[in-house]
DNA sequence: GCCGGGTACCTTGCTACGCAAGATACCCGG
DNA sequence: CCGGGTATCTTGCGTAGCAAGGTACCCGGC
């Protein structure tokens, strides 16, 4: 019943998900903007990935949203972390380190005790 | 046509795949054994993940296989890297570094210039 | 006036992955 | 002869990522 094992299991899946949470940690962000950041980092290919992801986060109560006017263009939906989202992000930070080190270890050929 | 971009795109998907390649780099391995290593590293949950993965690798010409007797139990199918598999692993090592740093950067809140 | 392109939202349909569960079979010891 | 460890592989489910398409706002150029 290692509570972190589930997180690790989802890690391969949910890296992107938690990157989004991290990006919204300190300020409200909107999707189009997030896509640009994630694309610049090479982590995402298209909007078709991010919008459904944000819907899931909202459905699961990890983010809240508000509509705001845009200075130029249609209104934007801004995303902010809920306490639950914050907790999830914190758990991810722990799991990510373990995951990263496992992959480093294996890929660098230091496995096989 | 950045040839590495495709690898990065598949990275979220294929971490496990390339971990398997890395594990077979220096010696022939069999699936049951690989599952144990990967499970110990927290990277995989069950055999149902690894066997189809190995089939894919074989189908795509990244590994070769041979059957060998087991000292105790049914015969084992051993996997070894092909030159193509070796190249794929090498490409992954590059991509993994970039990916890892992107995630680190975002998760540690150093994004948003 | 309208038309194209940037901004911004979201959905649909496809492919494929990870996993739990189950099937099969070898070998050994009790 | 039967259960458990070793070892292979398959089936079926849920769901993620992506390309592509759809809608609509706003602005500047023609």
Image (cartoon, coloured by chain):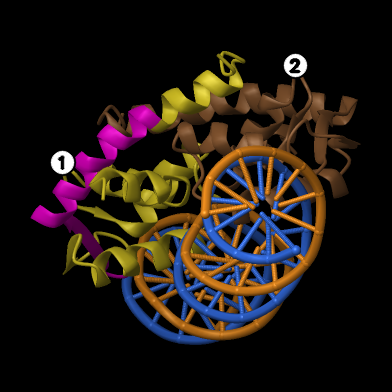
Chain colours: A brown, B yellow, C blue, D orange
Q: Which chain hosts label 1?
A: B
- Say if labels 2 and 1 share a chain: no
Q: Position of residue A56 (x, y in %)?
A: 78, 50
Residues at marks 2 and 1, CA–CA distance in whole angstroms: 45 Å
User: Which one is nearer the viewer's eye here, A98 or C2?
Assistant: C2
Confirm whether residue A8 shows in the render. Answer: no
Q: Which chain hosts label 2?
A: A
Q: Are marks 2 and 1 in contact (CB under 8 Å)?
A: no
State the residue at coordinates (40%, 65%).
B51
| Magenta stretch bounds | B74-98
Residue on which disc 1 sits:
B26
Residue on which disc 2 sits:
A26
Q: Position of residue B16 (x, y in %)?
A: 41, 48
In the image: residue A25, left or right of residue A112: right
- The image quarter containing residue A86 is top right
Which type of secondary structure does the marked residue at label 1 adopt? loop
State the residue at coordinates (46%, 52%).
B13
């Amino acid at each position: 019943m290692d509570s972190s094992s589930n997180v690790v299991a989802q890690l391969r899946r949910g890296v992107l998900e938690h990157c989004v949470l991290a990006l919204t940690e300190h300020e409200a962000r909107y999707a189009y903007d997030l896509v640009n950041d994630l694309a610049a980092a090479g982590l995402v290919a298209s909007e078709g990935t991010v919008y459904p992801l944000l819907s899931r986060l909202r459905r699961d109560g990890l983010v809240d949203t508000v509509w705001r006017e845009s200075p130029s263009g249609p209104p934007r939906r801004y995303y902010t972390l809920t306490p639950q989202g914050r907790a999830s992000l914190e758990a991810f930070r722990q799991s990510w380190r373990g995951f990263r080190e496992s992959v480093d270890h294996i890929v660098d050929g230091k496995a096989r005790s």
